[in-house]
Image (cartoon, helix red, strand yellow):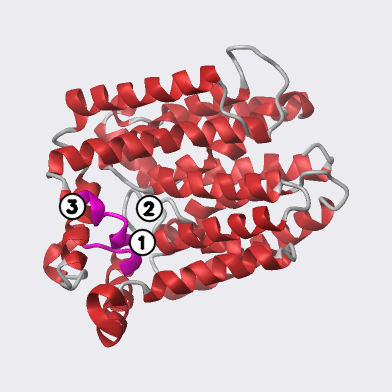
Amino acid sequence: MAIKTPMTRLILAAIVLSGLFFMLRLKNEMADFEVNYTAGQRIRSGETLYRAADGHWQFKYLPFSALLYVPLTLLPLPLAKAVWLTAIMLAAFLIFRIAFNLIDYKGNTLFSPAFFASLIVARYFLREFELGQINALITCLLVVCIWLLTVPSKPSADLASGALAGLAAALKPYAVVFLPYLAVRKKWLALAGGSAILIIAVLAPALFYGWRGNWVVLGEWKSSLATSTPLLLSSQDNVSLLGFLTKRTQGQTLSLAIYGAILAFLGGLILVIIRRGGQLSRPFVLEGFLLLLLIPLVSPLGWDYTFLAAAPALMLVCRHFDKYRPFWKTPLVLNSLIVSLSLYDVMGRNLYAAFMSVSIITVNFILFIGYLVYLRIKGYA
């Protein structure tokens, strides 16, 4: 995928804009980045990462994820924020750029699928930047993974694709859904690469903690998740299927049972979609984009801004808007408007709180799954 001169200019513009955006708006924000920056400082000093005293701001990822922030801890916090913001804004740009190539859109108009998809999910990217989160970077890695899967008959591409999936899973565990997919698709070299990277990532913090200390920290990670996750399932901003069910049933056992049944159904649906894609030249595009859309839904701690991962799937849906029957176009437009306009500043405090508390946004993205499935059933993508 060549990067031409206009693309280089856009990337440079993104860098400049990110710096200006930081200077004007976010220098006192990016609370989640501060948590990860602190984790980087702690792992560099061989200190434990998971402390109950941190409360809501407790580090929740694998110890390996803290290693990503170690180089940034060599910078003062304000400068580290600026560097990180630039990185995730570039990642966001690349998500759209690479996905745009993958959907094979031939038009050359301003109002492209990327334009409409960006309007739908803009609020999630803005929230990502405000918090200094890592989801844009993870999504970028997985989009590149999908792109490499489309490269025909190149073992090196398969290996690199799997390695990126493994790296993404090491940085944030929800990306592990790509590894079973590689197995089902019989991409054995990719699966080997991803598994190897994941194993290395689990062991790598031993450089700071020693072998025994590393296992202790991994145990602390497991314990911290077991303690904090149930308390966050009913959070207003938890848009996961498990969070949705917990809010509805008010019972953890029942919600887990229904959640397990839904996961089994989704797994079967993906198998059907894979089977239906046997005659397509690039079946990995829709399948990979569907997995990205599912990540916020199947991850128990799927916060609303993780729906930025759905951007490539929405681009594909917009790309094939003309393929849907007129009867189904209106619900698609209305659903997209609800997602894009469900803003605190638009709805106000009370209405927005009620909207998020009943997880309407979860239903919105479940509906998008149906539009993707239709494209595969009809053989359009």
Q: Which quadrant would residue 26 be assigned to in this image?
A: top left
Point out the frontmost of discs 3 and 2: 3
> Can you tell which mark lies on residue 301?
none
The N terminus lies in quadrant: top right
Label 3 vs label 2: CA separation? 30 Å
Circle 2 sits in a helix, a strand or a loop, which is it? loop
Q: Position of residue 104 (x, y in %)?
A: 72, 30
Q: Quadrant of residue 58?
A: bottom left
Residue at image position (43%, 38%) is 91
Residue 236 on the magenta segment: no
What x and y, as percent, mark residue 94?
50, 34
In the image, is residue 63 part of the stretch drawn in magenta? yes
Location of residue 274 with respect to 51 vertically, above or below: above
Q: Under tag 3, what secondary structure? A: helix
Q: Which residue is mark 3?
A: 73
Q: Position of residue 380 (x, y in %)?
A: 81, 36
Q: Magenta segment range?
A: 58-73
Reading the image, the residue beneath label 1 is: 233
Q: Amino acid at mark 1?
A: Leu
Q: Are marks 2 and 1 in contact (CB under 8 Å)?
A: yes
Chain-order first, disc 3 or disc 1? 3
